[in-house]
Image: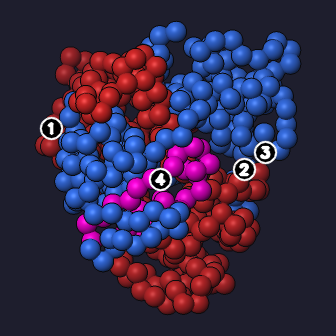
Chain colours: A red, B blue
């Protein structure tokens, strides 16, 4: 199994499969066909089979996938069979929103440290029990708390300065929420969150309907029937 | 040109192409090869050519793409040659962070209204000059301000209640930031933002390195050279 040959898009889809499988598991559904799972994930079923085939054989012909088993296997493949320790940097509105957002804990991501430069914020205890620490202690705290990934939630103007400090300590990846273009050492793992990419998909679908003369007017049903999409 | 046959993934990639083209344009680069653009977008160049071929002929053989022209065309295809009016619902930390986030305005998404149920917040004027309005005025305000998309930033426990109100007014799509499972009328356009999907990609790459015995120890360079990924 050559991990490096697996397309990034397949990895992104595995994430989506886990979200769907978790939902099925929460509904106490034990077995799911690849067709049904595909529908949940908005891909086609051949795609699911192909993505999973990179990693081994899953599912039973004529039966489907055992929900919990497949969830366990995909989480193992993705490296989610362990908790990942996160530090958040920048405790403004965005930082406070992220640390409180249920999705992280649900997926096994644990905030273990929080940093800011604002002396008024330093020392404040956050809902999870973490005290906001000064940026000057980034290295010491990251080592002590075994931080693996830094989540950057600073304003754009401060992000590069923060990144320069993060690459000097043993933190292995960055999730960047700031709207800044970051300069990083070659090969440093970074992912950027751009909220607007999904808005582009909405805009595309809405404007397509408008162009087809199917613009949902104010007197119409406000939503658009699925077969048009 | 049959828009409905175009895969969702191609639309998502078009968004990424625009981000890269904007960056090239900001650097005053006039022409880019599909190979260079592909590198920027982390896809292969055949993919770019295939995605663009859904919409027409772009680029000049042996020369490449004219950056501004291609950017203009893709933005037109995506429906981004107009501004889209957004309302934000839920003015906690997340709502405040989103309304101030530079990416929206940069991509042509304009917040025109903000709603909350908290009487202490109602009437407060936000940095962009918008006053927080009560949820009871959702319909009236949305009509007046021609809201097209609702951005939901409430706690999970309030999100379904908000959605039930949104589908009753002429708003055509939802971007959901709450970690709630929403029940929507068949065909209503909704996209969910899950911050952790990109963390899964980081986790996958980091854990793969660990498994290969290439775990970057505390004494190593903290980042990982690119050829390993």
Q: Secondary structure at mark 4?
A: strand
| Mark 2 or 3, closer to the camera | 3
Q: Which residue is mark 2?
A: A187
Question: Are both tags, 2 and 1, on one chain?
Answer: yes
Q: Which residue is mark 4?
A: B111
Magenta residues?
A: B91-118
| Count of all numbered marks drawn on residues in the image | 4
Residue corresponding to mark 1: A29
Chain under numbered label 2: A
Q: Position of residue A204 (x, y in %)?
A: 48, 29
Disc nearer the start of the sequence (2/1): 1
Can you identify the residue that label 3 sits on? B26
Q: Output the chain of dot 1.
A: A
Residue A101 left/right relative to B188: right
| Tag 1 near tag 4, CB within 8 Å | no
Label 3 SS: helix
Q: Is B109 situated left or right of B137 in this image?
A: right
Q: Nearer the viewer, residue A21 or A39?
A: A39
Specify the quadrant of the image occupied by residue A149: bottom right
Task: Determine the image quadrant of residue B226.
Answer: top right
């Amino acid at each position: 199994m050559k991990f490096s040959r697996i397309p990034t898009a397949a990895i992104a889809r595995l994430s989506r499969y886990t979200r769907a499988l978790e939902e099925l598991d929460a509904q106490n559904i034990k077995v799911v066909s690849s067709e049904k799972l595909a529908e949940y994930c908005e891909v086609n079923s051949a795609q699911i089979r192909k993505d999973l085939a990179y990693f081994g054989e899953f599912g039973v012909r004529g039966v489907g996938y055992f929900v919990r088993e497949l969830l366990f296997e995909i989480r193992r493949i993705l490296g989610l069979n362990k908790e990942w320790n996160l530090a958040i940097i920048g405790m403004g509105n965005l930082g406070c929103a992220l640390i409180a957002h249920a999705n992280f804990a649900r997926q096994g991501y644990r905030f273990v440290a929080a940093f800011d430069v604002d002396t008024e914020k330093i020392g404040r205890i956050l809902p999870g029990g973490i005290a906001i620490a000064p940026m000057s202690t980034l290295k010491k705290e990251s080592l002590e708390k075994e931080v693996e990934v830094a989540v950057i939630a600073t304003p754009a103007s401060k992000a590069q300065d923060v990144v320069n400090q993060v690459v000097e300590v043993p933190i292995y990846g960055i999730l960047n929420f700031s709207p800044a273009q970051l300069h990083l050492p070659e090969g440093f793992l970074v992912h950027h969150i751009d909220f607007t990419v999904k808005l582009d998909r909405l805009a595309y679908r809405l404007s397509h309907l408008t162009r087809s003369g199917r613009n949902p007017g104010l007197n119409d049903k406000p939503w658009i029937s699925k077969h048009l999409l």
